Image (cartoon, coloured by chain):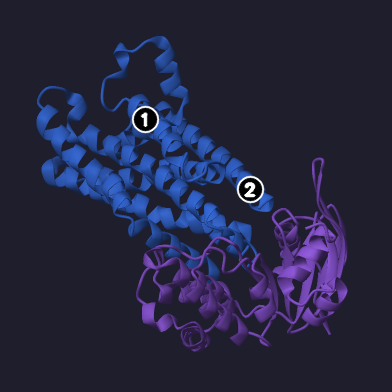
């Protein structure tokens, strides 16, 4: 079953076409990585799919619901963790989870269970009584992504989740994201090739608002004639000029 | 309802856990109330507690705009609000969540400054004090609405400067620090049509009684309600538009 069906999606800002004729399907439970250089249209695509920005034309269906005409229904199906950390700064880690659970209408028992799960998957029990503002960047990002477990979305958008983190924090976050695999469909945008390689089932490559390639890592190697994701990405994006 | 309570509780905690908000919304006005009374009350009637306390209540409420604005601009800037926007919560719940979290603070300000006024000047303790406290909710709607509007328009760097213009306006145009009679005609007209002096007049009248119910009560009440409704309508429109721009 497809979790996401994108049909000829297009977004224009005045005289700039940010996303052009994007069509794509993502299967339920899949981790799909969207790769692209700056300005490729990755974040704009995420914004349209998560109802934060209205497409100029085209449509996308999240579990059969249109992001254009059924935005409210779509919102109940997804969660977004943006490039910036999205947590309540002066609440503790535990209070952040409680708050997010209440926003998602969870019962007291459900809240207790999901909090335990967040502690297990992300190791947040070590900092549960610290306010979010006092956490390091890595812990804040972990909390931000952990909150996605609370809302139990069917589709989770992770927009450059490890941007700016040190290598250790990045690896810990990879482990946590991998642990979420199968619980939800995850769309991941990233600049890090090794991140896409380590986490994703399939990879999409965008440049200049267009989707240039979609497939598995092996298909990407075959398509580009290269033997690692970074070389293959450069080959596809530059058309062999770099 | 559960979502709304969660938002109110979260916003209240965010504001009250910022020591600066407690200093500016409660401690500083309280200090001003006590100091100005003891220094000036024998020199001019303006600083007798029955006039000073209602003025201090409205002055302190102007800081609600600043701290509501800071909270919203930080939420917008940090992507926290973006995340909430794609949650099950709806835009009216966000706005009510911000507004209702500030009302208890407005009420606490009013009770504190009237009670301290009463402890200093025992003649303050009367049924008028209850009217004054209840009427103080009216200007608080205006200042909270302004906070939501400014927080939706400004970023976290500019909100302080913009909100301080409002606080300055409340301070200079409320008529609480100096008698307005000596000012020019233009200033008097501005005081009459802007919400600041009307807010002070409404509370002082509620507390002391009105010479004329029409001009002392209904006129400032309707002017303030008009501003509060207008500001809230604009704030809701701007807030929703800014969220969609995300």
Q: Which of the numbered marks, if any, corresponds to residue A242?
A: none
Q: Secondary structure at mark 2?
A: helix
Circle count? 2
Judging from the image, what is the letter of the chain drawn in blue?
B
Judging from the image, what is the letter of the chain drawn in purple?
A
Q: Does B179 sit above or below residue B54?
A: above
Q: Write down the chain letter for disc 1.
A: B
Indicate the quadrant where residue A237 lies.
Answer: bottom right
Q: Is residue A94 left or right of residue A171?
A: left
Q: Residue A66 appears at what percent x and percent y?
A: 82, 67
Q: Write down the chain letter for disc 2.
A: B
Q: Nearer the viewer, residue B16 or A220?
A: A220
Q: Is residue B35 left or right of residue B111?
A: left
- In this view of the protein, can residue A186 be seen by the observer? yes
Q: Which residue is mark 1?
A: B168
Q: Secondary structure at mark 1?
A: helix
Number of other residues with Cα within 10 Å of mark 1, as a class: few under 14, some 14 to 19, many 20 or more: few
Residue at 60% x, 43% y is: B233
Q: Which of the numbered marks, if any, corresponds to residue B242?
A: 2
């Amino acid at each position: 079953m497809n979790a996401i069906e994108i049909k000829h999606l297009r977004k224009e800002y005045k005289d700039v076409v940010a996303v052009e004729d994007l069509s794509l399907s993502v299967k339920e439970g899949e981790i799909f990585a969207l790769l692209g250089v700056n300005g490729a249209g990755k974040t704009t695509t995420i914004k349209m799919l998560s109802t934060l920005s209205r497409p100029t034309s085209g449509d996308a269906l999240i579990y059969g619901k249109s992001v254009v005409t059924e935005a409210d229904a779509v919102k109940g199906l997804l969660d977004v963790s943006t490039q910036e950390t999205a947590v309540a700064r002066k609440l503790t880690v535990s209070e952040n989870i409680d708050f997010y659970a209440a926003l998602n209408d969870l019962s007291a028992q459900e809240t207790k269970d999901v909090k335990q799960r967040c502690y297990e998957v992300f190791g947040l029990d070590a900092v549960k009584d610290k306010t979010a503002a006092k956490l390091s960047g890595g812990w804040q990002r972990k909390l931000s992504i952990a909150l996605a477990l609370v809302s139990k979305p069917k589709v989770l958008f992770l927009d450059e989740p490890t941007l700016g983190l040190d290598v250790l924090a990045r690896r810990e976050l990879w482990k946590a994201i991998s642990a979420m695999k199968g619980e939800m469909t995850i769309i991941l945008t990233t600049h890090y090739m090794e991140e896409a390689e380590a986490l994703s089932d399939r990879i999409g490559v965008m440049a200049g608002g267009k989707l240039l390639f979609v497939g598995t890592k092996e298909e990407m190697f075959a398509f580009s004639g290269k033997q690692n994701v970074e070389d293959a990405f450069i080959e596809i994006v530059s058309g062999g000029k770099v | 309802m559960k979502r709304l309570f969660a938002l109110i509780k979260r916003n209240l905690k965010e504001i009250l856990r910022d020591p600066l908000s407690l200093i500016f919304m409660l401690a500083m006005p309280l200090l001003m109330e006590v100091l100005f009374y003891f220094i000036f009350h024998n020199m001019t009637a303006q600083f007798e507690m029955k006039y000073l306390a209602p003025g201090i209540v409205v002055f302190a409420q102007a800081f609600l705009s600043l701290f509501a604005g800071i909270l919203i601009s930080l939420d917008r800037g940090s992507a926290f609000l973006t995340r909430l926007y794609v949650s099950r919560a709806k835009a009216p719940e966000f706005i009510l969540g911000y507004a209702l979290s500030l009302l208890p603070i407005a009420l606490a300000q009013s009770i504190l400054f009237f009670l301290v006024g009463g402890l200093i000047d025992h003649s303050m303790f009367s049924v008028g004090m209850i009217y004054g406290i209840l009427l103080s909710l009216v200007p608080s709607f205006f200042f909270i609405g302004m906070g939501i509007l400014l927080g939706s328009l400004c970023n976290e760097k500019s909100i302080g400067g913009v909100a301080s213009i409002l606080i300055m306006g409340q301070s200079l145009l409320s008529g609480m620090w100096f008698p307005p009679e000596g000012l020019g005609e233009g200033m008097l007209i501005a005081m009459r049509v802007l919400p600041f002096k009307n807010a002070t007049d409404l509370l002082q009248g509620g507390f002391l009684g009105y010479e004329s119910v029409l001009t002392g009560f209904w006129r400032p009440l309707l002017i303030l309600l008009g501003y509060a409704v207008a500001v809230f309508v604009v704030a809701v429109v701007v807030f929703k538009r800014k969220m969609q721009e995300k």
